[in-house]
Image: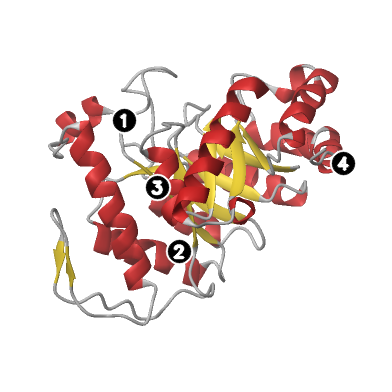
Amino acid sequence: MRTGIHFVNFTLPDQPASLATVLSATARAAEEGGCSTFTLMDHWFQMEQFATSQDPMLEGYTSLGFLAGQTQQMTLGLLVTGVTYRHPGLLAKIVTTLDVVSGGRAQLGIGAAWYEREHLGLGVPFPPLGERFERLEETLQICLQMWSDDDGPYEGAHYRLAETICSPPPVQQPRPRILVGGSGERKTLLLVARYADACNLFAPDPAVVAHKLEVLDRHCDAEGRDPSAIQRTILGFGDPLDDVDAFVASMEGYAKLGIDLVEVMPPGPDPAAWASRLGESVVPRLAELGPS
């Protein structure tokens, strides 16, 4: 099992002046410690479930572009961008740019979006859930077209593009990896099976994740897709360093289900030091875990 860091807490000492230094130091420590992925949230306001909407939050893709120059190996992405946040043609161009400047390390993580307050606060349209899923599928289709040899028009119910030119193309071939985040059985996991290279699931316990993966496998069968072609990832909760043995033991159950990557969140106030300790005590032990 591989380890990733999901950086969510920007309420740090001496911010905002310190944020660039802390963010880059954490990413470098994560990479030096063997983490394979470094992700950020895609929000304009901090989540109220975590802190308050007035707490600091950096724009995601600008921050990833900065981290592309601070790291050499890790995959960089958002977990996950909301489909409502950027026009899909521009989103494909942004992810392509990240892929080029990072030397082929960008991942498109995407979902249906949910944080209504930040949409209303900044005047961004927030359509009903059903429409957001329709837009999500069209956005996936547009990104795939822009990352192909087809630079012609796209005609959908919600988006119409006259030309899907994307020059330069991504460094990764045939394209950047796509991760669809969320656990919804009827729509989200269907879109994973239809379009994505990876899924990301919440992990309250292995039994829940096992059920979600069974649903994903059924969607793959219906779509004519090999389930093994989809990377299975989870977002871990709590601090692994509080009890390393217990955390590794809990991850063993997920690894037996075929979970390939767990992303964990630095609690602060010194995320770089935390990432270094993670690399010393957790990453090597998780690397020994695998499917049964």
Going from the N terminus, do you reach mark 4 or mark 2 first? 2
The residue at which mark 2 appears reads as 98
Measured as percent of width and height from the top left, residue 103 is found at 57, 71
Residue type highlighted by circle 4: Glu
Measured as percent of width and height from the top left, residue 262 is found at 66, 37
Residue type highlighted by circle 3: Leu
Going from the N terminus, do you reach mark 2 or mark 1 first? 1
The residue at which mark 3 appears reads as 191
Whether residue 65 can be seen here: yes
Query: Which quadrant of the rendered structure holds the C terminus?
Result: top right
The residue at which mark 1 appears reads as 45
Going from the N terminus, do you reach mark 3 or mark 1 first? 1
Which residue is at 53% across, 55% downward? 197
Q: Could you tell me how many numbered marks the image carries?
A: 4
Which residue is at 54% across, 72% downward? 172
The residue at which mark 4 appears reads as 288
Circle 3 residues within 10 Å: few <14, some 14–19, many ≥20: many
Instruction: Report which quarter residue 93 is drawn in.
Output: bottom left
Q: How much space separates mark 3 and mark 4, taking CA atoms? A: 31 Å
The nearer-to-camera label among 3 and 4 is 3
